[in-house]
């Protein structure tokens, strides 16, 4: 099972690598950060991704953002972190 903390660490690591690659175009080769961005695009809307990164970076939400995050984004993240959902996904893509 993937915990929310593990997901957060992975997002942090991949995003920081992605930022480094954007700063240095010579090193901008296909990487896990690019894959992560593609996967997040498939799962979350641009606004949801923005809230995920704000939460990860410790940036305060507005009241509306906080409500939307808890109602929608957090539930998606919990589903992704579910061991059963992960097993189903692995079995279906084989």
Image (cartoon, rainbow, N blue to C red):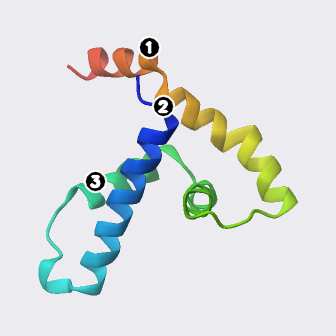
Contact (CB < 8 A) between labels 2 and 1? no
Contact (CB < 8 A) between labels 3 and 1? no
**Residue drawn at the location 35% of the way across and 68% of the way down:** 16
* Relative to 70, 36 lies left or right: left
* Relative to 29, 67 lies left or right: right
Label 1: how many Cα within 10 Å (few below 14, some 14–19, many 20+) = few
Q: Earlier in the sequence, mark 3 or mark 1?
A: 3
Distance between mark 3 and mark 1 Cα atoms? 23 Å
Examine the rendered structure and indicate whether residue 39 appears above or below residue 3: below
**Residue drawn at the location 62% of the way across and 63% of the way down:** 58
6 or 84: which is nearer to us?
6
Distance between mark 2 and mark 1 Cα atoms? 9 Å
Label 3: how many Cα within 10 Å (few below 14, some 14–19, many 20+) = few
**Residue drawn at the location 43% of the way across and 42% of the way down:** 7
Local secondary structure at mark 1: helix
State the residue position of label 2: 80
Distance between mark 2 and mark 3 Cα atoms? 16 Å
**Residue drawn at the location 61% of the way across and 54% of the way down:** 48
Q: Quadrant of residue 23?
A: bottom left
Tag shown at residue 59: none
Local secondary structure at mark 3: helix
x then y, percent, for residue 67: 82, 48
Local secondary structure at mark 2: helix
**Closer mark to the observer between disc 3 and disc 1:** 1
x then y, percent, for residue 76: 59, 35
Examine the rendered structure and indicate whether residue 54 appears above or below residue 28: above
x then y, percent, for residue 40: 44, 50
State the residue position of label 1: 84
Q: Quadrant of residue 57?
A: bottom right
Which of the image's four quarters has the N terminus? Answer: top left
Tag shown at residue 35: 3
64 or 60: which is nearer to us?
60
């Amino acid at each position: 099972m993937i915990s929310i903390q593990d997901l957060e660490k992975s997002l942090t690591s991949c995003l920081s690598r992605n930022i480094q690659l954007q700063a240095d175009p010579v090193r901008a080769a296909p990487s896990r950060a690019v894959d992560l961005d593609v996967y997040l695009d498939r799962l979350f809307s641009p606004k949801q991704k923005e809230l995920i990164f704000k939460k990860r970076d410790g940036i305060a939400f507005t009241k509306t953002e906080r409500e939307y995050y808890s109602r929608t984004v957090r539930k998606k993240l919990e589903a992704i972190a579910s061991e059963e959902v992960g097993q189903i996904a692995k079995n279906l893509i084989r």
